Image (tube, grey):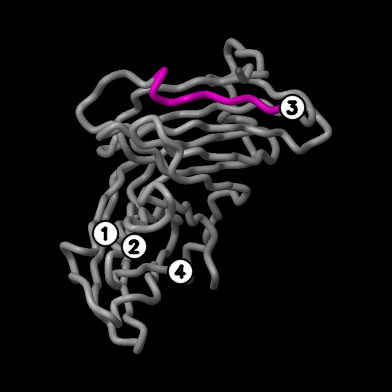
Amino acid sequence: MKTFGFAIAFGILCCLGAMAQVHYAFYYDLTAGQDVEINIMNPMFDPNDFALTVYDAYGAEIWSISGTLASAKSGYLVLGDHVPNVDYPWGVVTVDSTDRLIFGLEYYRNDQLVSIDSVVTKVPELNADEPFWLGTYYSQVGDSETAFIVMNPWPMTTSCRIQAYDSNGKNVYSQDFTLSPYESEYVDLTDAIGSDSSLWGLLDVTMQNRAVVIALEYYGRGCGGLVIDNVTDFYY
């Protein structure tokens, strides 16, 4: 049995905003028998204070915890053991810390581990005067299905445009999103564009001013039939 490995620090959540240097965000889903184990690792030489906050799909804060990890220490928590029963228990988790952290995310469905992802990149701060692009892979070929979740990890409204191109470079999907603070949007590409032998390729996200983060759910893949990937870094 794992032990959590960090001390809960009273008052950190209140004051961390003033001293936080690093901002992380990633996807969670507690619906339909799903759960997420969050493993938090401190690779730095000094103790690291952090505050973790869970938001529902509409951006409402539903649970939070703060703590300190000593140098090279790790801790973990299973979200389903802590997050209260709400109507929309999926969306974005944010973590603010005084220095860099590494996250190992284990995604479960019906008590079976289906996917493992690592998050090491903080949410980028963008230049408001120029656009940035985030890109990832989707597949709607054969039994493969892809859903994407676009999340706003900021306390301000943000917007982006998401486009999908097939393997021949044809634009097969385009949608503008405006997300309230910490709001998330789920799009099933099977409903949006269907399936076809050439329906795979680039899912492209245009951002400006404030970055969004993207998670992909790949169905029909892996031993559990589901693979989840978080994408936080822009490519240009």
* Residue bearing mark 4: 135
Q: Amino acid at mark 4?
A: Gly
**Magenta-highlighted residues:** 74-82
Alpha carbon distance from label 2 to label 3: 37 Å
Mark 3–mark 4 contact, CB under 8 Å? no
Label located before the other in sequence (3 or 4): 3
Q: Residues within 10 Å of mark 1 (few under 14, many from 20)?
A: some
Q: Residue furthest front?
A: 223
Mark 1–mark 2 contact, CB under 8 Å? yes
Numbered circle sitting on residue 160: 2
Label located before the other in sequence (1 or 2): 2
* Residue bearing mark 1: 177
Q: Position of residue 229 (x, y in %)?
A: 46, 53
Query: Which one is in front, 82 or 190?
Result: 190
Q: Residues within 10 Å of mark 4 (few under 14, many from 20)?
A: some
User: Where does the C terminus fall, quadrant-wise?
Assistant: bottom right
Q: Residues within 10 Å of mark 3 (few under 14, many from 20)?
A: some
Q: Amino acid at mark 2?
A: Cys
Label located before the other in sequence (2 or 3): 3
- Residue at image point 23% right, 67% down: 175
